[in-house]
Each structure stands twice: as structure tokens, then as C-alpha cells.
Image (cartoon, rainbow, N blue to C red):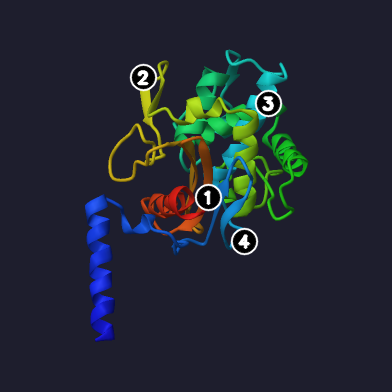
Amino acid sequence: MKRWWIRAGMLLALLVIIYLGVKPDMLVGKPGIKAESAVLMDMNSEQILINFNGSEQIAPAGISKLMTELLVMEAVINGELRWDDPVTISLYASSVGGSHLGLKQGEQFTVQELFQIVAVYSANDAAIALAEHISGTEQTFAKKMNQKATEIGLSDKTVFTNATGISEKLLGPNRPKEIQGQTVMTAVDACKLARYLLSNYPEILRVSSQMQVSMHQKGMYMSNTNWMLSSIGGPYAYDGNDGLKTGYDVDSGYHFVGTAERNGKRLISVVLGSDSREGRFIETRKLFNYGFTGSK
């Protein structure tokens, strides 16, 4: 008899869920996350709502470009750089592997064009070009990245070795010999970095929320790699999502740092080491659902 009542109760709960249109993964209770690590933060209070292996070092690939974006925006605000400054593509930048646009040595683009490509499409050649333009060399720029990491309170488990986050084998045949080692980050540090960027340069969301950006000079249009943007629609779109950064490494997997706002509450999520391109967004949805509906 007891088992019958339990089954009846479960059936009733399921009917209520279907009737109200509530998805099971939106119910109260911390979700199980299929990734190497994950963190969820309430941006306003800085409270960590979920911390799953958040202190584990992982090769973050494009996620580390959040620091590159931060330093570019900081240089513009400080008057060291202008958005319309021309940037010349070097031989090294033109030959980098991974996600890139095939920019040619000697071509020139504005800081703004390259910045948007980094933020929306995560292009490695654009990131290296910006780093070299700001600091002269990428290795000098990487030093600035690490200095800024210390300044904003990231742990010593996060170490930047280049402007892109990609491994040495993808840096191409013209990689300066001084650039060695693998960039590593933790999910907690990635979350702190995203919060600092959003708090100090909220205009980043105007860039990261674009569905598409163009490089008119080359007649190219690049779609945003963030499939959770509420403006995109589709199976992975999430109401309130307006950023922030994707990444992929052949060894560590698929990554995503996301942010969403509903009713004045902004969340920052980090998923590192998902096993598929789609998986990082599926796991992020679990985090957001918990943050907006389950964490009271």
C-alpha cells in the first residue's frame, strides 16, 4: 500500500510539472553536472551557489581571452589605446592555428574590429594581433595578464602564458620561442575574472550579445559561438543570457562562461571540461535554472 501511495504521489507531481510547463531540471535541488568543474555565482552578492571541483586546474583555451578583453578595454579607458587605431597583422598572428580568421600578414584592422572578433568568435589571430599592438610582444602581454590576475585576486593556480589560451602546438611555426607552457585556470578564478570584467566594463555585454559581427574589409560575417543567447533562439537559447565566452581544447574539452539576468538578478556560470559543444550549454542551463529558481 505504501508503495502505491509513493507512485501516485510521483505521478501527481509529474502531472503538475507538465501542467505548469516547468522543466524537471528547474526544480529545487542542486543539479548533477557532467563536466570536469563548474561554478555558479550570484554576481551582486558574490555568493558562490554551486562549486563543483572549482579549484581544479584546467586548460581553458578561449576562456582565457576574457583577460585579453579586459586588458584591451582597460587600455582604451586609460587612453593608451583608441578603438579606431589601426593594427597590423604580424607573420606570427597570421599563422596561428585553432579558431582563426585567416588574417594575412600586413593586413590592417581597427582595434574595435579585432576586439569584436575576439569577443564574439574567439579568433586567435585577432587576439595575438591585439596583444602585440598593446605590448609589443605577446610574451610581454602575458606578463600583464598575470599581473592583472594577481591584482584582482585570482589564485596562483591560474597562469597565463599567451593571449589566446591555446596550447603551444597550435601556436604555429612562427611562435616566438619565449612563449612556452600551457595556460591553466580554475573555474572559481574564471568566475571571478568574469565578475570583474562585468562589474568594471559592463559595456562588454553590448559586444558579447551580438548575434553576428562582420569584417567589411574581408567581406566576412562571423556568428556568435554562444548558442545560449536569448536573441538567437533555438534549443539552447536561454532567456536573459547576454554573454559571455566559449572555449575548446582537444585535451580538456568544451568550456563556457555564461551570464544571465532576470528580474534584476544576474548570475555568472562556469562550465569547464564538458564532453561536447552542446553539453557545455546543457550544463549551464542546469546552473542557471538552479540559480534563478532553486537557490532560496
Marked residue nearer the N-terminal end (2 or 3): 3
Name the foreground residue: 125 vs 111.
111
Residue 152 lies, in percent from the top left, at: 73, 41
Instruction: Judge by depth and name the residue closer to the eye, 214 or 98.
Output: 214
Q: Mark 4 points at which residue?
A: 56
Residue pictured at 76% horizontal, 44% vertical: 150
Q: In this view, does 92 lie above or below 267?
A: above
Alpha-carbon neighbours of circle 2 within 10 Å: few (<14), some, or many (≥20)? few
Q: Are marks 1 and 2 in contact (CB under 8 Å)?
A: no
Residues marked 3 and 1 touching at CB (< 8 Å)? no
Front tag of 4 and 2? 4
The outermost residue toward the bottom is 1
The front one of 281 and 29 is: 29
Which residue is located at x 25 percent, y 76 percent? 7
Q: How crowded is mark 1: few (under 14 residues within 10 Å), some or many (20 or more)?
A: many
The residue carrying mark 3 is: 74
Secondary structure beneath disc 2? loop
Q: Is mark 3 on a helix, strand or loop?
A: helix
How crowded is the residue under tag 3: few (<14 C-alpha within 10 Å), some, or many (20+)? Answer: some
Residue ID for mark 1: 270
Q: Mark 2 points at which residue?
A: 219
Disc 3 marks a residue whose amino acid type is Glu
| Distance Cα–Cα, label 1 vs label 2 | 33 Å
Among the 4 quarters of the image, the one containing residue 31: bottom left
120 on left or right of 139: left
Looking at the rendered image, the disc whose residue lies closer to the viewer, 3 or 1, is 1
Give how far apart the Cα atoms at labels 2 and 3 are.
29 Å
Q: Using the image as rendered, state which of residue 35 and residue 12 is in the foreground.
A: 12
